Amino acid sequence: LIKASGAKKVVFTCPECLRTFNLDYQDFLGDFEFELVHISQLVDDLLKEGKIKLKKGASKVTFQDSCRLGRHMGIYDEPRAALKGAQAEVVEMDNSRDKALCCGVSAWATCDEVSKKIQIDRLKEAKRTGAECLVTGCYKCMIHLNCAQVNKTQVPKEQIDIPIKDLSVFIADALE
């Protein structure tokens, strides 16, 4: 359907979809005649070209490098550039980029006590940055980290209570 549409570029907001198209589908279908990009890459390009302008977003944010966007696809700089384009100060967690902790759940398969510990550890790490918001480019990370915040945990809520926002929504809110 995409080939038939004549599209030259396909923009993904979901890192897992981007990864699947970029790595898995091309193994079976061959190279595509269209470009595959994550929304952060598009926003970064549009900012550099002066085609969009962003107003000030949250003043201090930290970014969750998801497994598929980061380690699988190597996309680290563009999400941060998009956040900076919204005049946000990006503060890094102790473990970021290729060292980032994941959200603890892969393929929706499990969400056990080990997963919850990973989620809690990641939320604590985000909170320790002093950021006003944890931004993620992955819906799974957002869902699982939010879940860890609202479910009963063995840690005081103030150690993990940081607003979590999707990168696409953060950028949309910052559009002039």
Image (cartoon, rainbow, N blue to C red):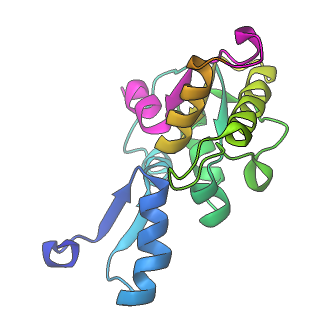
In magenta, the rendered stretch is: 153-176
Outermost residue, right side: 94
Q: How many marks are shown on the rendered structure?
A: 0
3 relative to 81, above or below: below
Picture residue at 38% right of the left edge, 39% below the top: 52
Residue 87 in sight from this viewpoint: no
Q: Is residue 156 left or right of residue 173?
A: right
Instruction: Residue 80: give x, y in percent of width and height.
Output: 63, 42
> Who is closer to the viewer here, 155 or 102?
155
Instruction: Residue 120: give x, y in percent of width and height.
Output: 73, 29
Instruction: Residue 171: give x, y in percent of width and height.
Output: 44, 33
Assess whether residue 114 is covered by the magenta stretch: no
Q: State the image quarter where residue 92 is shown.
A: top right
Instruction: Residue 155: give x, y in percent of width and height.
Output: 77, 16
Picture residue at 58% right of the left edge, 58% below the top: 68
Q: Quadrant of the C terminus?
A: top left
> Who is closer to the viewer here, 80 or 49?
80
156 relative to 129, above or below: above
Assess whether residue 164 is covered by the magenta stretch: yes
Q: Is residue 26 left or right of residue 163?
A: left
Q: Quadrant of the N terminus?
A: bottom left
> Who is closer to the viewer here, 41 or 106?
106
